[in-house]
Amino acid sequence: MNYNNYPSSDFLFLLGNLSILPECILIISLIAVIAIDLSNRGRNTILLHRISLISTSIGVIASLWQWWIHSVPIVFGNSQISNFSYIFRFFILTCSLLSVLLSVDYIRCSKTVLAEFSFFVLTAGSGGMVLCRANDLVTLYVALEFSSLSSCFLSGYTKKDIRSNEATTKFLLMGGASSSFLLHGFSLLYGISGGQLQLDKTADGLPLSRYVVILYTSIAFITAGTAFKPSLVPFHQWTPDVYEGVSPTPVVAFFSVTSKVAAPALFTRLFGLIFPHFSNEWHMVVGLLATSSMILGNLIAVTQISMKRMLAYPSISQIGYIMIGILAADPENGYASMITYTFIYILMNLGTFARITPFGLRTGTDNIRDYAGLYMKDPVLTFSPVLRSPSLGGIPPPSGFFGKLHLFRHGWKAGSYPSVLVALVTSVISIYYYLKIIKLMFTGKNGRSDASTTYIQNSLVSPSISKSSIEIAMIIRALASILSGILIDPIIGITRNTLF
């Protein structure tokens, strides 16, 4: 791009060169975490936590600054800088920041290693940020693998836990299969486009009248490869096992949000830029995957007895809701509502995991029935789900209701009638199992006679856990969930104005 065509070209050139500033900040913090951990042999946990927290906070501020200041799209070789990529980079940094904030008390109480958690979280965040702005097939694939492998290693964070090892093995095997599908689809595109790697040149080089079978085959393989990360049905089999098998709840919290952020960015860049002439075909396929995810995710969640496994299936259905915004024929309103709902989902879901993390630390259990009578034992832990669970289910007035309202409305206007109808019905189903947990906390009675004793005397309890950063963050996110619902119209307006 010729910078002389724009006013203040030197300033824009400087901004372009600084466009990788958030990524550089995370890489520097990675090096610092490794160096300090090796020099102190993992003893300085607080310092490592502060480095991770400060670096992600600075990255969030830098990303916000670039988002608001930088309004002219600039292309640098393998990366395309635009407001769309800035928004999703900001989301991924926010997910990393909140996950690190959620982890410190768990690491202290469970006596696990913080350096490995911080390292893989920051590495996966860096890969996701590059993924949001990748402009060629090789960079896109490498960034996706960078993020996926880091998440895979993070799933094996507790190396001595057999369930964690089993979850990592499943994640690695299925991730490798999906990676081979995606790479095969990319190789087909590379061949029939005349050896083009950049997304726009690949789209221009595709022969629309010839090699139609190869084009459809490429779309099928790319869809299968990209559907694995957000857990779209039928590529979701790894999700429940990994959620339940990974013992550290902060790891599961990180999984639950980063994949839902990276997936819309990946789908819009791949399908929107490479296959604009085949929009009807890939819209139909992705619509079927989204509909199947909403149905299966909500129906199976009703039968679960493990809290983390139960939350895995709603996360499968949530990506189906998000995909409605991608399928909208009107990119302006569809993308704006999808981005807004994704932001609301980050607050809702991380707030939910902030609630179950201290409960798991104090009781050592993940069973839903053990939440019975929680109101009498800890009103603070009960406060968050009373606000958060209805938001996830779509009950007003929390933000989840208004986010879904705008998302479904624009999907209906775009003609996605089957997907929106299924989304409405399955949202009602989700209300049932969320309200069931709330009812259990207020009125239920635990059948285990030692439940109260276990709750108080568990060896994992920290003396200051009731005033920990987990509960502070839990209350903040609960309030943010309410406020974002009240301010939903200004938020969507700002998103639409910055996108278009």
Image: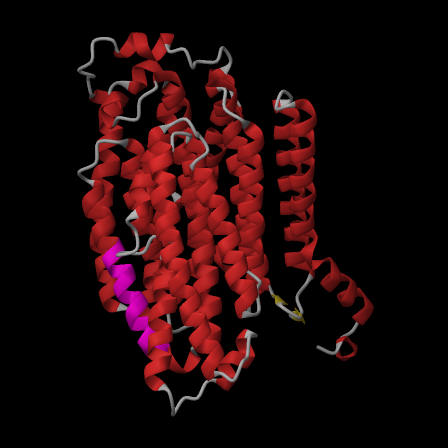
Front-lying residue, 214 or 392? 214
Name the outermost residue toward the bottom.
209
Q: Position of residue 230 (x, y in %)?
A: 38, 53
- Residue 228, image x and y in percent? 36, 56
- The quarter of the rendered structure image containing the C terminus is bottom right
Residue at 58% in and 31% down? 115
Left or right placement of residue 105 versus residue 230 in this view: right
Is residue 89 within the magenta segment? no
Q: Name the foreground residue: 7 vs 307.
A: 307
Image position of 34 with respect to 428: above or below: above
Q: Residue at x 25, y 9 (%)?
A: 450
Instruction: Where is residue 197? Give x, y as percent.
Output: 55, 75
Q: Does any portion of residue 395 appear in the rendered image?
A: no
- The reply to whether residue 448 is visible in this rendering is yes
Q: Which residue is rendered at x = 45% and y = 67% of the image?
A: 268
Image quadrant of residue 419?
bottom left
User: Please, what is the dominant secondary structure of the magenta stretch?
Assistant: helix
Q: Which quarter of the rendered picture does the N terminus lie within?
A: bottom right
* Residue at the (70%, 43%) spot, across then down: 28
Question: Magenta part of the protein: which range?
Answer: 279-293
Decide whether residue 288 is among the magenta residues.
yes
Colour scheme of the rendered structure: secondary structure
Position of residue 441 relative to residue 153, above or below, is above
**Where 248 sits versus 243, above or below?**
above
